[in-house]
Amino acid sequence: MNQRMNKLIKLSLFLVFCAGIHTAPALGAETLTLNQAIEQALIKNTGLEIKNSQVREKQQRLKEMRSHYYPRLMALGTGGRATNPLDYTLSAGTIASALPSNLSPMIPPSGIPLKGHDASFMNLTAMVVQPITQILKINSGVDIADTDVNIAREERDKTRGDIQYAVKKVYYGILIAGRQKKEAELRIKLEEAQLSDAENAFASGVALPLKISGLKAGLLNRSQDLLSLENRIANLSYMLNDLTGRPLDAGVLLDDTLEASVKTQTLAQYDSHALSQSHELVIADLTLKKAGLAVDAAKKEYLPDMNLYALYNYENDFHVIKNHVGVVGVSLSWTLFDFGQKSSVLGQRKALRHQAQKNYKRIKNEVRRDIKKEYTNLQYSNQMIDLATQVVEFRKDALKIASDLDDTGLRLNTAKLEAAAELAKAEADLFAATLSNRLIRVNLAKLSGSYPTVTR
């Protein structure tokens, strides 16, 4: 039984060693600070590149809509060769007159030949058209396109904030797991020392086999904990590399120097900022505005389409008609009845506006709820930091006492190792509480829209 347990312990320690080799940074690995990681993510992140492209797309759409204000110059040309060229004579007196026959002259007085120059013909038309009543519809289209640009920009800025928060969360997660790994390594050393003491005591007839088996099982559990932390660090490293656009297997050393924390505001200040600056709320408000503009555009579809136009025509066919003709006039198009198409579209737009109104209220309530929730978490987090700080101080005192006893030979070495492990745990807990507190502050600022986003 003991031999089998020893083999399991050796296998477990070997796996821990292999995992340590796999996740350990390569020699010469780049040292990455948090700000550098954020900058790389904002430059190379694919999701943000898509959002930037969407902003450019909406801007081009706005330019397209504004172009409809200006006249359109159109040209049309036809040409061909007739299989049966026109060759006809309009006889004298063919055209009837409204005058009495005794007073009516012959129209035409003599025969007029109607004949093409040849079998080929050509017709060229150029036209300039300026919309008149459509300008009202164009105004709505431009306003909607401009709103789409603003929505795309807000979504891009929201994505920037989400990326920065995600980078910080993963970065801090790696640092926390690193501290917990150190604690786990000290726990393994402690378990090994305690097992060695127990085996010596067993050889002397002092300890029971049951205690040795329990210590060996505990050592295996500690090895499992260490493997789990190694795996967590590896997975978080892959996530960080993916966020920053680096190769997934790229080695990196993280700088655990903490930057200045985001300044804390009151709950009322967070609420006030959120109502005017929260990206989610601004997007919902712009969507509501767009829905209202769409309703106005649907109403304007009932107006007729009126255009001013100037036309020039050149025709090379019949010699009885002038080759060059110029025309200036007005065109009007008005659909008097469409079997309810326009009213159906208007009804759809009104339904969308109603949805946007309800969605704005929903988003507003969710943002305020999330801010209240995070602010409560912040208050508890501050208390956790205070308690964790006191624990660290007590653990430092305990380690000093254990070290003094070890120096005088009054206690076994395991007491010092245990005190060191407990201190490492307390420091890891304090470090985790501090970083969690920072994440809560960042999330509060992000929710309220007061967190600065780096422009790239």
Image: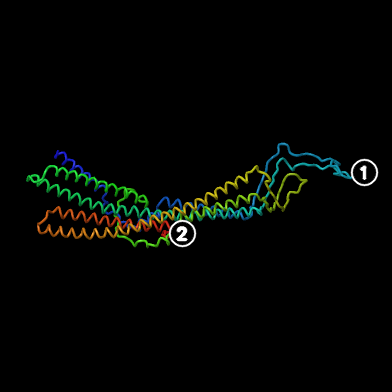
Which residue appears at 59% of the width and 51% of the height? Answer: 295
Q: Which mark is residue 154?
A: none
Look at the picture and state if 31 lies above or below 199: below
Look at the picture and state if 442 lies above or below 17: below
Query: SS for tag 1?
Result: loop
Where residue 95 sits: x, y (%)? Answer: 84, 42
- CB-based contact (under 8 Å), mark 1 and mark 2: no
Quarter of the N terminus within the rendering: top left
Crowd around label 2: few <14 · some 14–19 · many ≥20 (10 Å): many
Left or right of residue 264, residue 176 in this image = left
Query: Looking at this view, is 374 or 188 the one in front?
Result: 374
Q: How is the image coloured?
A: rainbow
Q: Residue furthest left?
A: 204
Which residue appears at 13% of the width and 60% of the height? Answer: 404
Mark 2 or mark 1, which is nearer the start of the sequence? 1
Quarter residue 273 falls in: bottom left
Crowd around label 1: few <14 · some 14–19 · many ≥20 (10 Å): few
Query: SS for tag 2?
Result: helix
Type of amino acid at the residue the image marks with label 2: Gln
Q: Which mark is residue 102?
A: 1
Where residue 65 sits: x, y (%)? Answer: 58, 53
Would you name the residue on which mark 2 appears?
277
Which residue appears at 63% of the width and 49% of the height? Answer: 301
Res 122 seen here: yes
Tally the marks.
2
Give the Cα distance between marks 1 and 2: 91 Å
Where residue 76 sits: x, y (%)? Answer: 66, 47
Query: Looking at this view, is 137 or 263 the one in front?
Result: 263
